[in-house]
Image (cartoon, coloured by chain):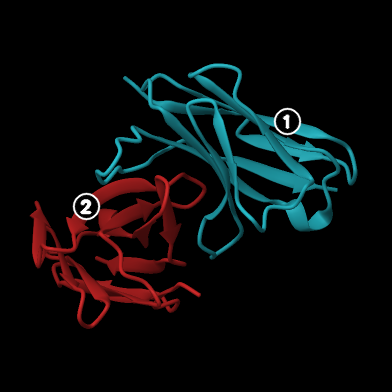
Chain colours: A red, B cyan
């Protein structure tokens, strides 16, 4: 069955450093992959989408890579700020307008 | 601002007492979704509507039902809530364009407590 894995351990990082999160998947060949941010007690918010034929996508301080051979996506937050502290979810497309979400990685940026 | 609204934000119900959660959207999106999310877990899709077409996930318990009376509104009915149904319930929408990637827009969620 399809499986999406994100590091369940929280990532603690110093302000100004780059945070790197990993999303691995198995038994799956997604056409695209999405990243969302979720704050405590709130719904996820869409950040970035990357397609299978794209290696890299950037948006402001965010960068996403997509390696379909390794079945992995990396999500980078450069020059991290305390306001970046949140849980980040990756999601892969499934048939029929559906997404399958990973469990998310919590990021804590310390001043 | 166009958005997805969920009411109430917090709902407390008793074991076995039916409860309805509501979702509305001003985005005029074709697709509406209901997810269940428990603490530190991935959002789990319960079902979704493409316009009026209802799509149930295979592992969604019969205890969960949904209605979409019009484009803007969608309801989640839990007929006999159990303690295991305590969770955050998230409503989301997407444009549903065929063959294209569609990001999802989420509401703030309803936190359900079952006593």
From this viewpoint, which residue is outermost toward the right?
B16
Chain for numbered disc 2? A
Q: Residue at x 26, y 76 (%)?
A: A72
x, y percent for residue B67:
65, 27
* B38 displayed left or right of B113: left
* Number of residue marks: 2
Q: Residue at x 78, y 34 (%)?
A: B19
Q: Which residue is mark 1?
A: B20
Q: Which residue is mark 2?
A: A48
Task: Kindly identify which numbered label has been placed on residue A71.
Answer: none
Q: Secondary structure at mark 2?
A: strand
From this viewpoint, which residue is outermost toward the bottom?
A70
Q: Residue at x 40, y 19 (%)?
A: B26
Please state which of residues A54 and B104 is positioned toward the viewer in this rendering. Answer: A54
Please state which of residues A32 and B78 is positioned toward the viewer in this rendering. Answer: A32
Q: Where, by quadrant of the figure, is residue A45 drawn? A: top left
């Amino acid at each position: 069955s399809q499986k999406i894995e994100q590091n369940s351990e929280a990532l603690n990082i110093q302000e100004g450093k780059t945070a790197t999160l990993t999303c691995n998947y198995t038994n799956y060949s997604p056409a695209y992959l999405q990243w969302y941010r979720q704050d405590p007690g709130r719904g996820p918010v869409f950040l970035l989408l990357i397609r299978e034929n794209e290696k890299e996508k950037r948006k402001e301080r965010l960068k996403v890579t997509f390696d379909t051979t390794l079945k992995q996506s990396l999500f980078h937050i450069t020059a991290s700020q305390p306001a970046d502290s949140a849980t980040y979810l990756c999601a892969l497309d499934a048939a029929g307008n559906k997404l399958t979400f990973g469990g998310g990685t919590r990021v804590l940026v310390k001043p | 601002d166009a958005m997805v609204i969920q009411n109430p934000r917090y709902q407390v119900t008793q074991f076995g007492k039916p409860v309805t959660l509501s979702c509305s959207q001003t985005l005029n999106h074709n697709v509406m979704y209901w997810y269940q999310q428990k603490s530190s877990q991935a959002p789990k899709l319960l079902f979704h509507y493409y316009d009026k077409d209802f799509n149930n996930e295979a592992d969604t318990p019969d205890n969960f039902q949904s209605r979409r009376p019009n484009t803007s509104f969608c309801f989640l009915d839990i007929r006999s809530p159990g303690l295991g149904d305590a969770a955050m319930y998230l409503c989301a929408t997407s444009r549903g364009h065929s063959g294209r990637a569609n990001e999802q827009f989420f509401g703030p969620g309803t936190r359900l407590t079952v006593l």
